[in-house]
Image (cartoon, helix red, strand yellow):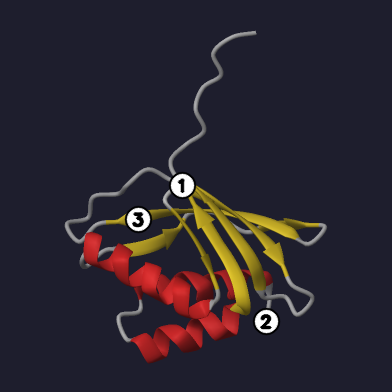
Amino acid sequence: MSIEQVVATYAAAWDEPGREKRKALLEASITADAVYVDPTVETRGIPALMDHIDTVAARYPGSCLQLTSAVDVHHGLGRFGWRKVLADGTELPECIDIVELADDGKLARVIGFFGPLRPRTGP
């Protein structure tokens, strides 16, 4: 599977309401002990990430995750842009994920940053 396919499969897991289908998508795209970190949470392993996705889905019912960029990769690391689109079509600010790839091409670590980079203030 190409890195673009891995990331698309991972992103699809965030929109999948069925736990068994979501588990299958995550198993195809991340390692069993993958670490997911964003400003609000840190999880390890597929079951913990599935629970976190449930929490996000409950907070944003009917929303979807939209990939907004290609995947850049070098030296076993990657990055891609995404945003949450709410059920009414409102687009939340674009975010970025930094990923570490396992030897098999799956995601071993996902580090999420919410919103655009802040402007620099100072020298």
Tell me the CA gap for discs 3 and 1: 15 Å
Point out the residue furthest to the right here: 75
Question: Label 1 sits on what residue type?
Answer: Pro
Question: Label 2 sits on what residue type?
Answer: Met
Q: Dividing the picture into quarters, in which one does residue 63 lie?
A: bottom left
Residue under pointer 1: 39
Point out the residue furthest to the top here: 123
Q: Position of residue 109 (x, y in %)?
A: 63, 64
Q: Is disc 3 placed on a helix, strand or loop?
A: strand
Q: Is disc 1 placed on a helix, strand or loop?
A: loop
Residue under pointer 3: 84
- Judging depth in this view, the residue of 50 and 7 nearest the camera is 50
**Which label's residue is closer to the chain start, 1 or 2?**
2
| Residue visible at 78% across and 62% down in the picture | 76
Up-down relation of residue 45 to residue 69 (above or below) = below
**Which label's residue is closer to the chain start, 3 or 2?**
2
Residue under pointer 2: 1
| Residue visible at 79% across and 75% down in the picture | 103
Answer left or right for 16 relative to 49: left
| Residue visible at 51% across and 22% down in the picture | 119
Tell me the CA gap for discs 3 and 2: 25 Å
Q: Position of residue 66 (x, y in %)?
A: 41, 60
Residue 12 seen in this snapshot: no
Tell me the CA gap for discs 1 and 2: 29 Å
Q: Is disc 2 placed on a helix, strand or loop?
A: loop
